[in-house]
Amino acid sequence: MALHIPSPSENGFHLGPVFVHYYGLMYVIGITLAILITQRRWQRMGGDPGLVGDVALWAVPAGIIGGRIYFDITTPKYIPHHWYGIFAVWDGGLGIWGGIALGAAAGIWRVRRHHADAGLFADAVAPALLVAQAVGRVGNYFNKELFGGPTSLPWGLYIPPSYRPPGYLSAQTFQPTFLYELIFDLALAAALVWLGHHRGVKVPGLFALYVTGYSAFRIFEEALRVDPSEHFLGLRLNMYVAIAGTIAGGVWFWYTQRYGKGVPATDGAVARSAAARGAGDGTGADGGGAGEAEQPAGTAGEPPGDTAASDAAVSDAAGNDAAADRAATEGVAGPAADTGPGGEPPAEVGADVGGDHSAETPPSA
């Protein structure tokens, strides 16, 4: 008998009077892992881990709503034929594109309400999103969905006849594209974590790479899938979205690394980002002190230019006799008033003695 991956016989279990769908359970587990991972990453960056819970409280429902809206719009023929069919997420049908778009919008709103760096937060959450998506793909396995064309490979997935699309009733095993995506999601998550620690990617570069990498993989995946989907000009609708996401994500990443001013999403990045924003706005503590220190020293209440003019006037008006008299008055020996240490004219000595030295730079040690 040929090897293959069997389909599960059940798609859920009873917990008292409640029937728990594995599809929904996997999403709950995935979301929980995403929150925990993001909290750990955000805290290591120096952020408040409590912000993650607040963002999740808004972004998760928004993501589910966005995912369902995308599914209902792009695959209307596959909405369950009940009055509540458009809401029946427990039967499957969450479009990742809509979920990420609406969830990200809600998340950005909450992060900015807390005056935190949205780019840093996006980079903190990017690997966590991939982990959540990978776990969610296990739910697709229990729903017997998201599979590719027929295959004789040892890891081919057996799909019962009632779940096969028209034209594939004679086939037995199919490409387990949900499994391919699960593996890819975990690999990309690990790659993003590694890049963040070893390559100094400027924010929100990791999130841009998440968009680019996941979208690029979906081009490959959509080319394999034969499960129900809307088509346009002979291609699955999701194929066009994946191509657009790959291009947009790649351009976004290039721009952030070439022209972006964000700091890398590493340990202590929150404080560095705040300092950089303060310096750019001219409100940083160091920036204010530096500005004061750079002003030339002069007589109190007198502009620097007046001090320089005063010194020059003293130098021009001083004669040899006046220089000698000043030197004698201040206790300087007569011979020292005749010539300076380098043989300079007496007037220069007088100007030097009467000059203001407070703005001069001391010699290096």
Image (cartoon, rainbow, N blue to C red):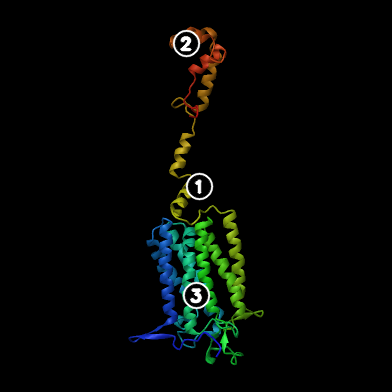
**Mark 2 vs mark 1: which is more N-terminal?**
1
Label 1 vs 3, first from the N-terminus: 3
**CA separation, marks 3 and 2?**
88 Å
Query: Foreground mark, 3 or 2?
Result: 2
- Left or right: 14, with 8 as reference point: left
Q: Are marks 3 and 2 in contact (CB under 8 Å)?
A: no
- First in sequence: mark 3 or mark 2? 3
Q: CA distance from mark 1 to mark 3?
A: 38 Å
Residue 305's spot in the image, x, y percent? 53, 26
- Which quadrant of the view contains residue 330? top left
Q: Which mark is residue 67?
A: 3
Q: Are marks 1 and 3 in contact (CB under 8 Å)?
A: no
Q: Amino acid at mark 1?
A: Gly
For marks 2 and 1, give the CA distance: 50 Å
Identify residue for label 2.
Answer: 327
* Up/down of 196 relative to 352, above or below: below
Q: Secondary structure at mark 2?
A: helix
Q: What is the quadrant of residue 205 in the picture?
A: bottom right
Kindly report which numbered mark, 2 or 1, lies closer to the viewer in this rendering. 2
Q: Is residue 240 above or below residue 49?
A: below
Secondary structure of residue under mark 1: helix
Residue at 41%, 67% in the rendered image: 35
Q: Which quarter of the rendered picture does the N terminus lie within?
A: bottom right
Which residue is labeled 1 in the image?
Answer: 280
Say if residue 11 shows up in the picture: yes
